[in-house]
Each structure stands twice: as C-alpha cells, then as structure tokens.
Amino acid sequence: MRRKCSVTFKILTIIAASFAVLQSAKADVATFADEAVPRLSQYLKVDTVNPPGNEYRGVAYLSQLLDDAGITYTTAESAEGRGNLWATLEGSADKDGNKKPALILLHHIDVVPANLKFWTVDPLSGDIADGYVYGRGAIDTKGLGIAQLQAFLALAESGLQLNRDIIFMATADEEAGGFFGAGWLVENRPEIFSGVGYVLNEGGSGRRYGEDIAVMVEVTQKVPLWLRLTALGKPGHGSAPQMQTSVTRLIRGLKRVSETEFPVNVIAPVAQMFEGLAPYQSGANRSAFANLVKAVENPDYLLGLKLNNPAGHALLRNTCSITTLEGSSKINVVPAQAHAELDCRLLPDQDPEAFLVDLNNIINDKQISIERIMGFTPAISRTDTPLYKAIAKVSEQAFSAPVIPTVAGGFTDSHFFRDLGVTSYGYSPFVFAPGEFSGVHGNDERLGIENLKQGVHTLYQLLVEFAVQQ
C-alpha cells in the first residue's frame, strides 16, 4: 500500500511540476508581448521597399534582436543586398531517435512602395498613435514577423522540451515573386528544409463579424500567370495618323480582354470556404454562401457579388487585370511596338497552356504576341494534420472561434514549400475588424497594439500545443 501511494505521489509531483513550468512560461510571455510594440515600430523604420528590397537592413535589425537573446542564426544574400535569415530552436528526438517534422515560422522582410502624399503619417515612421502601429509592412508582413519572433524567443526562454525543431525564417523579395528569398533558399540551401513538415506563413487571420470571430486558414491560392503583350505596327509621325498602329492594335486587344468574363468554376475548397462563412452573413447572402454552386447559377447574384465583394467574386473564375501600358517615349512618334502587362490569376485546377490558347483567341490578332513573365504551380495543403488540429484547438481556446479553410486570391511564398510536399498554411495570429485590413498595399497600413500583443500570446500558445513534449 505504501508503494502504491509513493508511485501516485511521484506521478502527481511530475504533473504539478509540468503544470508549474507551463504556467511560469506563459507568465513570461507578457514581457515578450509588450516588447513587440516598440520592436515593430523600429522594424517599420527599416527601409526595405521592394524594389529594390535592401532586405539586408531588415536582417541586420533581426540579427541584433537574436544576438541580444543569445540565439544563433544564419544569414545569406541571394544577390547584393537581398538578405535572408533563419534561426532554429532544436527539438528532441524520441526513444527511437526520431524527431517530429519541423515547423517554419515564415515572414518576408520586403514591403511594397507607399506614396507619402496619400498617407497621414510617413510610411516608414513606425508611428504609434491611437492604439495602432503605423507603417508600410505593419500587416504585410513585418507585424507577423515580430509576433513570430517574440513567440519564438518566449519559447526559447521557457526551457520547455520541444518534440520538433522550430525555425524562425525571414526572407527577401516575396512582393516580387520570392525568387531572391524563399525560392532562392529552396534551390540553393535545400539542407534547411530537410525534416521540415510544416510552414506557417501569411495569408490567413482571424476576422471579426460583429461579436463573432472566425479564424481563416489559407490552404491554397489562385495561381499567378503574369503576361506581357507586345503589339507590332508601322512606326511613323504623329502628325499623319495611320489606319492601324501598334497602339490601336493593343487597345483593341485589351478591350476584348477587359470585356471577357471567364467561365464560373466553383472548386471544392472555395465552396467549403463560402459554406464556412455562411453563418456570418446576413439576409440572402447566408443561403447563397451555404449553397454557392446553386447561387452562381443566378447572373444577378454574380453581378452583386462582383460589385460588393470583388475578392470573393474573383475566387469563382479565372481573372486578368490590365496593370501596365507602354507606348511611345515621345508624343509625336508612332511606335513600332506597344506593350501591356496582365496580372492573370488562375484557379488551382486550371491548365495555364489551355488558358493561353483561350486568351490568344480572345485577343484575335496575329500581330500581338504573349510572353509569360511569371507563373507558379498549384498545390493544396490538407487540413487533416496535427498542425491544423492544433490551430483549431487554440482558436477555440483563445477566441471561441471556428477555423475555416480558405482560398487566397493573391499569392504568397507558400507555393515554394507546397511544391516540396511541405504542408503550408496561411495563418496570422491576429484578429481584424472590418476595414482594418484595408491598409495592406494601400494607405495608412497599421496594426492594433492590443492585436499585436494578443497575437504573440496566441502564437506562443499554438507553439506550446504543437511542439512541446507531451
């Protein structure tokens, strides 16, 4: 009897000790969450506008923070000034000498340009005002990077035993395709990704609908197909108008493209996404979201969706946006060539070659050629994984929120990892109210102070749930 009590006492002691460690580690997170605010402010002051990028500046800033924490890291430049950084918290192997697949926390250092004329603050000021941190990249994605870093540092300090490696990674060039960042690392530093099974990247977040919250986790995205159109014609003087020129040919072809509505195609992940969002809709939209395949049979519904929810409408078909035009460099010269660029986005089940054939038929001009600038391969990450289950559990604990798998209209670096067979989710630990996300690639980009702090706590909680030895 004494032996049984002794064993029970030891078990209770172990449980209590484990609980105490977790509690003390959680208590320490508050300091890291508070530090996130000034650190994001400083990070936003670092000019990494792409082009040209100069991500080495961001690497220098992050390196300083890792040095202060006593964490080793590695850096690499894919080209002059195009910096990348990664640091690893080592996990422990099991009794058979195996580690669970590693997790990468990924964000990109570069940001898109911003026009000071249309901002109320300097885009590189990192101003803290009215409960927000302002600056280009606050959401996309320096805010995410700082939340990841602070949760990473808190985990390092906690002393908790990990069952897998956790890798903090900051990369260059995502805003221009990632070829000097994540893509370059995959090709030139493949050893980093040996044993990696998961990536958490931008692309999803919590969204507030009145009093309710839903956590969006991106599992796939439309595939970019960037194209350059070149129209040929006879050059001449602007004082002698011709019947047809490279410019008029191009205008006519672009008009045909702009007036084309590509066929509706409701893929399963999009239908699942809309169905998950249905409870947060009002009126007729609720039933339409719940049965999207039926709803899109109504042309009036499609038109209303395009007017009121263009991002949602774009997930129902292939799209092309005319984004750049180039003709003569002189007003009185009719050019021999005129150019345009199209930002086309294809649904993941589409064949790019077949799409190009259709586009050529739409333009219907043998004097207009189409050159492919950039294109990626499609891939979808499964949702029946331990990481997705951990996200669902933490979302329920933190926000009483369901997790909804989503499809992104834009692209991220996740496709590089999905091509390797690595499960990649777009997941940001923030919760955005309506309108708060509008600054991304727009004016007055900002991230709420409390949102940032809570994000550090939420992400830390997720890392403990997913990576701490049970």
Image (cartoon, helix red, strand yellow):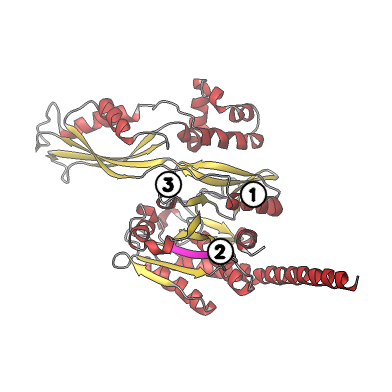
Element type at mark 3: loop
Badge 3 amino acid: Phe
Main SS of the magenta segment? Answer: strand
Q: Is residue 130 visible?
A: no
Badge 1 amino acid: Ala
Query: Where does the image place residue 401, in percent across and percent down from the top left?
Result: 67, 47
Mark number displayed over residue 272: none
Element type at mark 1: helix
Region of the chain picked out in magenta, as a range: 165-170
Q: Which residue in the structure is indicated by mark 1?
A: 392
Q: Quadrant of residue 86?
A: bottom left
Q: Which residue in the structure is indicated by mark 2?
A: 164
Query: Where does the image place residue 130, in percent across and percent down from the top left?
Result: 60, 60
Q: Is residue 52 left or right of residue 200?
A: left
Return the disc, 3 or 2, that comes first in the chain's sequence: 2
Q: Which residue in the structure is indicated by mark 3?
A: 411
Residue located at (28% from left, 26% from top): 362
Q: Is residue 333 left or right of residue 419?
A: left
